[in-house]
Image (tube, rainbow, N blue to C red):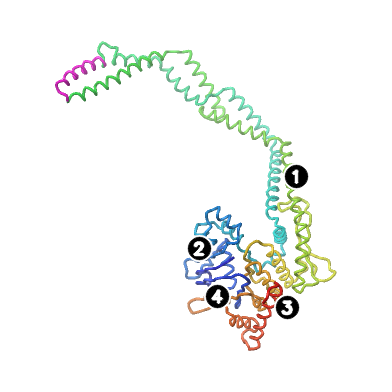
Amino acid sequence: MLCSLHIRDFVIVDRLDLEFGAGFTVLTGETGAGKSLLIDALSLVLGERSDTSWVREGAERAEISAVFDVSGNAGLRAELAGRDLLEDDQVILRRVLERAGRSRAYLNGAPATLAQLKEVGEYLVDIHGQHLHQSLMRPAAQRDLLDGFAQAMPLRELVRQAHARWQSLQRTLADFERNATGLAREREALQDQVAELARLKLAPNEWEALETEHRRLANAASLIHGADEALQLLSEGEVNVLSTLRTLLARLRHDAETDGTLVPSAELVEAGQIQLQEAAHALRHYRERVEVDPQRLAQVESRMQALHSSARKFRVKPPELADTLATAQARLAEFAHTGDAQALERQMAESLREYQALAADLSARRARAGVELGERVTSQLKRLAMSASLLRVHLEPMEEPTAFGLEQVEFQVATHQGATPRALAKVASGGELSRLSLAIQTITSELANVPTLVFDEVDAGIGGGVAEIVGRLMRALASRRQVLCVTHLPQVAAAANAQWRVTKLSTHERTASRVEALDKKSRVEEIARMLGGVEITAATRRHAAEMISLSSVLSSADSGTPP
């Protein structure tokens, strides 16, 4: 349930703090006072897109926050608990709009995206706009209403996904058939490439190893000569470094016995002697291992030439040959899955069967829901002074499968006894459309799981006794949901449990909206204004008080509770 709405610097609203209760609450006021702005503000905090023009003139930012009690909303509580966002059975949604164009959103104090606000908002509020009767003429809107009533939106999304897969396979097959010759040439070239590279039997990091070995073999004589010279200087010459170090070390050890400060120097010389001995050992091992091997050198050069030749042919560097082979093999594997027209046709047929099964299920749900929706709307129309009218939901089969199913949805209406139902757009007048829209909205709202329903002047185009019935319908809905309604009809306002009046105050500097909760006396004055206009007489006030009293009695009779 919506507990409070806080608005700062939004259009002509500078500051509003509204506290809401359960039941049926109406917002009334003169045209242009800003009644619908409150609904716009609520829509924004529920994730609708923003516009910089909504920031009040002279302000840098607009800020809207709404507090909801979710203690009885198990689905949303579980969702928020899973994200560590549940706090004291409350949800606080906040939206900040900056004049510079930036928009920020928050969910229980944590930054959020508009998609996240919308997702949470779907658990909290269902808003019925004043222009639904206009969109009701569009086939897409009629389809959405029926599928929502049938609770078939998740199934329709599965149908859309299956249709997208089927179309994708159709395009793939068409591309394959159109490019069959070129693809065949590509596959043949890849097969030759893979065969040639496979014959090379490339080893991991082979090129780097060949280069190292080639340098050693090509310079073997020079390397052996260098090792001999180094060994002569180190240990094998008549005069060598190691023999000189031994003499030096013996002298330092002798002198260290006299002067202990020479001990560190002797130790350093000894450490150097050990390292030079190890170097001499390593050089002898190297000299024995390195040999002049013209035959092996020829083999290495031949192998390098073969790799060079393949690399030039495939326009890569020799170290990249292994990657080239892997890429060619992967591309051939793709051909194994998509390069076979018969395999593609089988996949496409299977995809179409999957789509048809899902779409048939959707069609069956639509057919059942269409009958029920038609009967319930027809029954509601009788209460709205359209006793001879009826609504029929017609399903027209499509020639080709579509993303939304196998049929088009058309609302058909007959406005007098014995008339053949015809398309809504061709039959209904403006007033009839308003009442039809209201009937559909009240019925679909009964099925909604959201705790708060908002109606924004959906009673436009009706009046008199019909308006009184609309008020009773709203009050009946409010026995199960929190209902907020922006209205200009006194009959609807009189049926409410609570009433807010929206006024517009203008000064030389600015214009601002104000909202005040009305007590019993103020309600009589406001409904009298709605009834009588500028001149409010005692008779008008008596009529207003009588309407409020009578609405309470009738609504209690409708709900079966004492007034």
- Where in the figure is residue 283, as x and y percent of width and height? 35, 17
- Nearer to us: label 4 or label 2: 4
Q: Earlier in the sequence, mark 1 or mark 3?
A: 1
Residue 243 colored in magenta in the image: yes
- Nearer to us: label 4 or label 1: 4
* Drawn side of residue 10 relative to residue 533, left or right: left
**Residue closest to the eye, 17 or 12:** 17
Task: Please provide the residue range marked out in magenta.
Answer: 242-260
**Residue closest to the eye, 510 or 540:** 540
Residue at mark 3 to residue at mark 4: CA–CA distance = 28 Å
What amino acid type should be assigned to the residue bearing mark 4?
Val
Q: Earlier in the sequence, mark 4 or mark 1?
A: 1
Q: Earlier in the sequence, mark 2 or mark 1?
A: 2
Confirm whether residue 37 shows in the render: no
**Residue closest to the eye, 33 or 173:** 33
- Where in the figure is residue 368, as x and y percent of width and height? 77, 57
Q: Residue at x 72, y 76 (%)?
A: 466
The circle drawn on residue 353 is 1
Q: Which residue is mark 3?
A: 465
Is the residue marked by circle 1 packed among few (<14), some (14-19), or many (20+) residues within 10 Å?
some
Is the residue marked by circle 4 packed among few (<14), some (14-19), or many (20+) residues within 10 Å?
many
Residue at mark 4 to residue at mark 2: CA–CA distance = 21 Å
* The N terminus, quarter of image: bottom right
What amino acid type should be assigned to the residue bearing mark 3?
Gly
